[in-house]
Image (cartoon, rainbow, N blue to C red):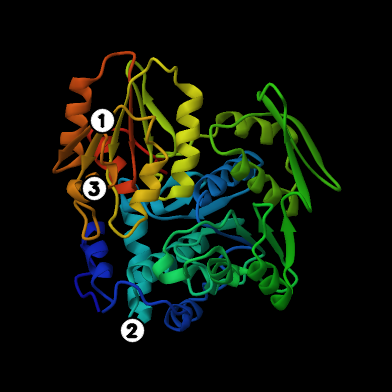
């Protein structure tokens, strides 16, 4: 038990929950579900949505959150990881909470867990559920941390389950192909409840698991469709009962926006087309193709696997003239597919500033450089040093892209005092 509970700061509590469990990762739901049941947190809100997938969870959740809030619905969001501060993991009405709210929720979890050991993510998940209950949200949106079936968020009997897409990531845990990964992720599906999949190509195991569970599978190009106009300035979304036309092109992947609209179509709320269009026009998620400066153009993106970096490189190609010089600042975790992630930028980047990440799983600049033989490379001990050099080397017509991990973009956001979400 954490004894100094009266005056402890949030940082003290975070340090406590990081070291509470003897293993960094312990996939299984028995312990966390037991504590949740004691605290009556298994039904934290009238309506709960769980969102899994390899990429696009954050953007899908954020657009859904914005649409619901603008429609007068009280929303809580739990997502991970955070970029700058732990508080970002839990939002109420689009705003992050004060330290005091988080500390109070952690005290409650600590008091009732007794001798039950909880991992950092499990403790954080319970804290989020407790805060959703405290603030009486109408809808709780839970972003899966890893996989699905054995993730702590899966203790809730969600009303809608979502898988944005399936690509290769965390292969050492989830499996080395889409079918094995799909089997883990589809563990969030529920009997006779909508199970939304944001891709057209459904892995066989996902289809089989949905049938076994009895989930109502709701798939792109089978149950709902999208069409982008030839001028690429507008798009449409429709299903058998509902149509949205002349939608603005958002600053997030259209596939993720379309998945969010599929969720909206399954909800029992009155949501206007005007609100949907307004939120599509305004949507911007911190650290996802975030343009923070012009002249030179500076872009932050947390893309950390080949699937995400392919989308990022295509976006870079679209917005840049061939005459612009691109300097890429990259830092990654060593357990990611570094070669596949960086390969999407070969031939696009003029300069590579490889930076070591200060993290127990961080790759060194030397480990990154191995995959960039023949490229114009500079190596740095940290991201800020790589940034300082890129600024010196760039003119107003150039572009600096910082990507590879949340741990890569975070130091730059802190340096430039760029915030993520407003506080409550």
Left or right of 165 in this view: 369: left
At a point 47% along the width and 27% down the height, the residue shown is: 317
Residue 401, compared with residue 137, is above or below; it is: above
Disc 1/disc 3 C-alpha distance (Å): 30 Å
Work out whether mark 1 precedes mark 2 in sequence or the reverse, and give the earlier one: 2
Read off the residue under disc 3: 370
Point out the residue furthest to the right here. 241
**Disc number for residue 416:** 1
Read off the residue under disc 2: 114
* Residue 67: % across, % down: 63, 41
Judge whether residue 296 can be spotted in this image: yes
Q: Quadrant of the N terminus?
A: bottom left
Disc 3/disc 2 C-alpha distance (Å): 48 Å
At a point 76% along the width and 44% down the height, the residue shown is: 225
Disc 1/disc 2 C-alpha distance (Å): 42 Å
Work out whether mark 1 precedes mark 3 in sequence or the reverse, and give the earlier one: 3
Question: Which residue is more in the foreground, 95 or 119?
Answer: 119
């Amino acid at each position: 038990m954490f004894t100094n509970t009266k005056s402890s700061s949030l940082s003290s509590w975070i340090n406590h929950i990081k070291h509470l469990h003897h293993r960094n990762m312990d996939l299984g739901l028995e312990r966390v579900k037991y504590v949740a049941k004691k605290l009556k947190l298994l039904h934290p809100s009238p309506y709960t949505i769980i969102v899994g997938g390899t990429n696009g969870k954050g953007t899908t959740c954020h657009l859904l959150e914005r649409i619901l809030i603008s429609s007068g619905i009280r929303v809580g969001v739990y997502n991970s990881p955070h970029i700058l501060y732990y508080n970002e993991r839990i939002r109420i009405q689009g705003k992050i909470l004060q330290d005091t709210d988080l500390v109070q929720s952690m005290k409650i979890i600590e008091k009732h867990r007794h001798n039950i050991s909880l991992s950092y993510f499990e403790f954080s998940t319970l804290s989020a559920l407790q805060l959703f209950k405290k603030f009486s949200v109408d809808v709780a949106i839970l972003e899966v941390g890893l996989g699905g079936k054995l993730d702590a968020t899966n203790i809730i009997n969600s009303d809608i389950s979502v898988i944005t897409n399936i690509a290769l990531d965390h292969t050492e845990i989830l499996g080395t192909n889409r079918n094995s990964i799909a089997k883990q992720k589809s563990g969030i599906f529920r009997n006779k409840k909508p199970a939304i999949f944001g891709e057209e190509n459904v892995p066989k195991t996902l289809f089989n698991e949905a049938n076994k569970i009895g989930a109502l599978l709701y798939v792109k190009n089978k149950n709902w469709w999208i069409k982008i106009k030839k001028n690429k300035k507008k798009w449409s979304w429709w299903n058998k009962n509902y149509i949205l036309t002349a939608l603005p092109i958002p600053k997030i992947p259209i596939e993720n926006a379309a998945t969010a609209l599929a969720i909206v179509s399954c909800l029992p709320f009155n949501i206007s087309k005007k609100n949907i269009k307004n939120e599509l026009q305004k949507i911007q998620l911190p650290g996802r193709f975030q343009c923070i400066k012009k002249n030179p153009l500076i872009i932050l993106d947390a893309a950390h696997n080949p699937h995400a970096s392919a989308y990022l490189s295509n976006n870079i190609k679209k917005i840049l003239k061939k005459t612009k010089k691109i300097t890429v600042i990259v830092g990654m975790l060593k357990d990611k597919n570094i070669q596949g992630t960086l390969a999407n930028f070969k031939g696009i980047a003029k300069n590579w500033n490889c930076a070591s990440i200060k993290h127990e799983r961080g790759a060194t600049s030397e480990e990154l450089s191995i995959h960039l033989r023949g490229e114009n490379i500079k190596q740095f001990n940290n991201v800020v040093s790589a940034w300082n050099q890129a600024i010196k080397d760039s003119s107003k017509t150039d572009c600096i892209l910082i990507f590879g991990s949340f741990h890569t973009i975070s130091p730059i956001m802190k340096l430039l005092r760029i915030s993520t979400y407003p506080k409550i």
